[in-house]
Image: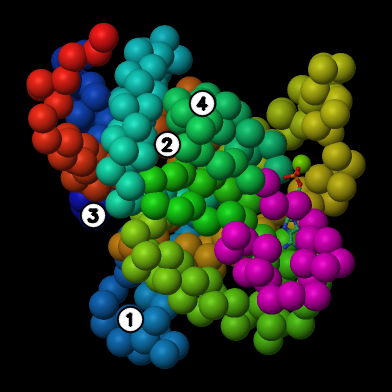
């Protein structure tokens, strides 16, 4: 269970409470609260603009991208990730059959942060039939002529379905802010628009999970270098990403504002340590499983008289 307890800092291992391997799964769960962005002080909320945004200052430098909880190697988590994927598939089928809930997963990260890899390794557990993956790139001329949520809304999931956003409406307060693509007044108003939009979705049965895959600037360097070294990764190398990299600190500030202003119990942010891909996959998959378990779903009642049916 994910509870809002501040356990940031020490791992169970550091506290000398090394868990038995069989207990490791729940041990990792108790570490997750550290990744859930705190919802902020209710007293601050009272003075927050129009009472809608709960402002709690987030300092990303307090979150360690190298963290891997109680685990040291990939082989330790392989089975856990696999069982999460299996559980995700079961729960998705139940979600589809029940037709009451929908789920929206938002992935944001710096370039080479692992959004594609997370979709491949974790979301690979979803049945493609009930799942819609959509990437948001530079808006078209037509999209720019509309409000910034116009291109987003059609991709939100209907009941029974899952949508995965590879980048999202948050780009409109991240890259747009850092590159000054619109005046400050315009992007500043967007936090409220985003909060209202997500509230609308949540009120309509959508469970929203937002993941920031947190890599270090060093790790990004390594991943860019790997892309340059491997011919099969060249297609991923975008020289424009190097320009973005020079604004690293500005992006961190922009992300921190997102976590402070657009984090709510009905649309929480998770800051996932993502330098180690295997741990990232474990964290993301476990949070998804837990969120789906909490939906408390049930198969619809069977038609009456099924037991009497004989198939000729
Ligand atoms: P990729 O994820 O590698 O396909 O790159 C997509 C690019 O589109 C990134 O450089 C994003 O910053 C950019 N992008 C996404 N949304 C927006 C937006 N609303 N305004 C400007 N650029 C965007
Ligand atoms: Mg790219």
Q: Which numbered marker is on residue 284?
A: 2
In space, the residues marked 3 and 4 are separated at their CA atoms by 29 Å
Q: Residues within 10 Å of mark 4 (few under 14, many from 20)?
A: some
Which residue is under mark 1? 45
In space, the residues marked 2 and 3 are separated at their CA atoms by 17 Å
Describe residue 92's horizontal placement relative to residue 215 as left or right: left
Q: Which numbered marker is on residue 111?
A: none
Which residue is rendered at x = 51% and y = 79% of the image? Answer: 192
Q: Which numbered marker is on residue 4?
A: 3
Which residue is under mark 4? 124
Which residue is rendered at x = 58% and y = 55% of the image? Answer: 155
Which residue is rendered at x = 77% and y = 67% of the image? Answer: 143
Total number of numbered labels?
Answer: 4
Seen in the picture, residue 75 relative to 289 is either above or below; the reply is: above
Residue 9 appears at what percent x and percent y?
Answer: 32, 43
Q: Earlier in the sequence, mark 2 or mark 1?
A: 1
In space, the residues marked 1 and 4 are separated at their CA atoms by 38 Å
Q: Residue furthest front?
A: 312
Describe residue 196's horizontal placement relative to residue 137 as left or right: left
């Amino acid at each position: 269970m994910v509870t809002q307890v501040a356990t940031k800092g020490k791992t169970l291992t550091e506290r000398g409470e090394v868990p038995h391997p069989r207990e490791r799964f729940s041990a990792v769960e108790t570490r997750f609260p550290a990744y859930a962005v705190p919802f902020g002080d209710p007293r601050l909320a009272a003075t927050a603009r129009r009472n809608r945004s709960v402002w709690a200052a987030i300092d990303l430098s307090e979150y360690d991208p190298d963290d891997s909880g109680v685990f040291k190697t990939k082989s330790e988590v392989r089975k856990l990730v696999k069982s999460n994927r299996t559980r995700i598939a079961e729960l998705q089928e139940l979600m589809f059959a029940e037709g009451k809930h929908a789920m929206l997963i938002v992935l944001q990260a710096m370039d080479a942060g692992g959004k594609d890899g997370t979709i491949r390794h974790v979301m690979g557990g979803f049945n493609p039939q009930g799942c819609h993956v959509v990437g948001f790139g530079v808006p078209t001329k037509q999209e720019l002529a509309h409000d910034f949520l116009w291109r987003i809304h059609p991709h939100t999931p209907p009941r029974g379905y899952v949508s995965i956003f590879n980048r999202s409406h948050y780009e409109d307060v991240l890259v747009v802010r850092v590159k000054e693509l619109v005046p400050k007044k315009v992007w500043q108003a967007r936090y409220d628009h985003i909060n209202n939009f997500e509230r609308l979705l949540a009120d309509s049965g959508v469970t929203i999970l937002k993941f920031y895959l947190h890599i270090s600037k060093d790790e990004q360097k390594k991943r860019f270098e790997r892309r340059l070294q491997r011919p099969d990764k060249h297609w991923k190398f975008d020289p424009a990403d190097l320009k973005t990299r020079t604004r690293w600190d500005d992006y961190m500030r922009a992300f921190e504002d997102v976590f402070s202003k657009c984090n709510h119990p009905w649309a929480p942010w998770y800051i996932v340590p993502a330098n180690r891909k295997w741990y990232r996959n474990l964290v993301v998959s476990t949070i998804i499983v837990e969120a789906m378990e909490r939906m408390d779903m049930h198969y619809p009642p069977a038609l009456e008289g099924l037991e009497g049916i004989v198939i000729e």
